[in-house]
Image: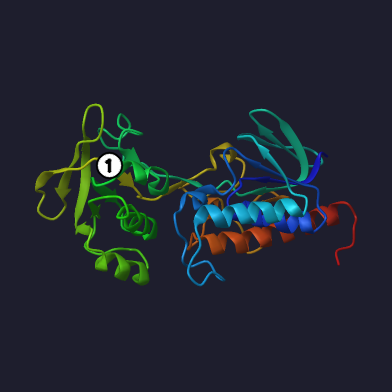
């Protein structure tokens, strides 16, 4: 085998698993298709990660996690995983540029932001339609913007956008937010934010760039157009588990099922973070699951190699 453990995904769950596995003297490879950090690396400010009284920027926290894991010997490879092969004596993780064998595998591939699926969204993606306020917010100074969603991400990123925008309209299909109360309170006090309740975006308007949105009130069924220059979409996530379809047990949405030890339906394959079915998707829960997955994977490898676990 090339490695003791291969980790698929470099978000907080994968990086924590890498830290624990490498520190446990496991020869460990982490495969990440982009830059390490996952969605957390695109979050402007994280206020609920323990130990940071005033909060910490997502990119800073993820870079620190990567550097810490690398210090203990974690090997990081930029490659997108396409397949997982079950071998007689282990596994082969197949990427676009390489094939890596291991005694155990930890799936920490995370999730991708969901799309609205409305007319104009795909055509104007990158031309005013965005899924990352941290990446694109600065392009919209003194403009009116629309944020779609009602959870933590939508409200937090909406507040971030007020640093640049003239006005931020948050469109939510219900009459109350799903975000944490502390986040809601800050948003309601922000004079640059306006909330449009019981409404959905039916169409994103514009030819060469976003010019506005067509809104529909779900209670009155009235429609109206709201001029804006940017639309930021936060309506949920889709688990990055497509390469495992038919191989490990999942729910109907594609989230991987595990037990409390992060074990999947395949012995020797573990899962952690946002790709796993669970109640709370946060950086802190991903880290805890990553540590558990690494611990379980190390036990599995040592038992397989005939090493008494201490």
Whole-percent x and y of residue 47? Answer: 46, 66
Whole-percent x and y of residue 114? Answer: 39, 44
Q: Residues within 10 Å of mark 1 (few under 14, many from 20)?
A: many
Q: Can you say which quadrant of the picture contains the C terminus?
A: bottom right
- The answer to which of 37 and 114 lies nearer the viewer is 37
| Rendered residue at 49%/47% (across/down) | 111
| Rendered residue at 56%/50% (across/down) | 256
Q: Look at the numbered disc 1 and give the secondary structure of its residue.
A: strand
Q: Is residue 309 left or right of residue 286?
A: right
Q: In which image quadrant can residue 129 be found? A: top left
- Position above or below: 163 against 130: below
| Rendered residue at 45%/59% (across/down) | 45
Q: In which image quadrant can residue 96 be found? A: top right
Report if residue 271 is visible in the image.
Answer: no
Q: Can you say which quadrant of the picture contains the N terminus?
A: top right
Report if residue 68 is visible in the image.
Answer: yes
Whole-percent x and y of residue 71? Answer: 75, 53
Please name the residue that numbered disc 1 is placed on: 230
Whole-percent x and y of residue 171? Answer: 23, 53
Query: Total label count?
Result: 1
Q: In which image quadrant can residue 263 be found? A: bottom right
| Rendered residue at 55%/63% (across/down) | 285
- The answer to which of 284 and 166 lies nearer the viewer is 166
């Amino acid at each position: 085998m090339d490695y003791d453990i291969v980790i698929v995904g470099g978000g907080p769950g994968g990086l924590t698993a890498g830290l624990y596995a490498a520190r446990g003297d496991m020869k460990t490879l982490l495969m990440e298709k982009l830059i390490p950090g996952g969605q957390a690396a695109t979050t402007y400010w994280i206020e609920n990660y323990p130990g940071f009284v005033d909060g910490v920027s997502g990119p800073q926290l993820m870079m620190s996690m990567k550097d810490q894991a690398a210090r203990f010997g974690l090997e990081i490879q930029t490659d997108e995983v396409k397949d997982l092969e079950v071998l007689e004596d282990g596994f082969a993780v197949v990427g676009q540029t390489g094939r890596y064998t291991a005694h155990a595998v930890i799936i920490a591939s995370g999730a991708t932001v969901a799309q609205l699926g409305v007319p104009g969204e795909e055509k104007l993606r990158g031309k005013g339609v965005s899924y990352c306020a941290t990446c694109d917010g600065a392009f919209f100074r003194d403009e009116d913007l629309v944020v779609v969603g009602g959870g933590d991400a939508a409200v937090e990123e909406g507040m971030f956008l007020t640093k640049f925008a003239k006005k931020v309209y948050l469109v939510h299909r219900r009459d109350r937010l799903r975000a944490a109360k502390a986040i809601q309170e800050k948003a309601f006090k922000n004079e640059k934010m306006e909330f449009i309740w019981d409404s959905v975006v039916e169409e994103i308007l514009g030819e060469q760039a976003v010019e506005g949105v067509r809104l529909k009130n779900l209670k009155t069924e009235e429609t109206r157009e709201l001029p804006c220059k940017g639309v930021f979409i936060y309506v949920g996530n889709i688990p990055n588990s497509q390469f495992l379809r038919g191989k490990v047990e999942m729910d109907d949405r594609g989230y991987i099922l595990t037990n409390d030890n992060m074990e999947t339906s395949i012995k020797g394959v573990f899962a952690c973070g946002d790709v796993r079915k669970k109640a709370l998707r946060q950086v802190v829960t991903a880290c805890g699951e990553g540590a558990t997955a690494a611990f379980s994977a190390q036990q599995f490898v040592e038992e397989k190699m005939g090493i008494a676990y201490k």
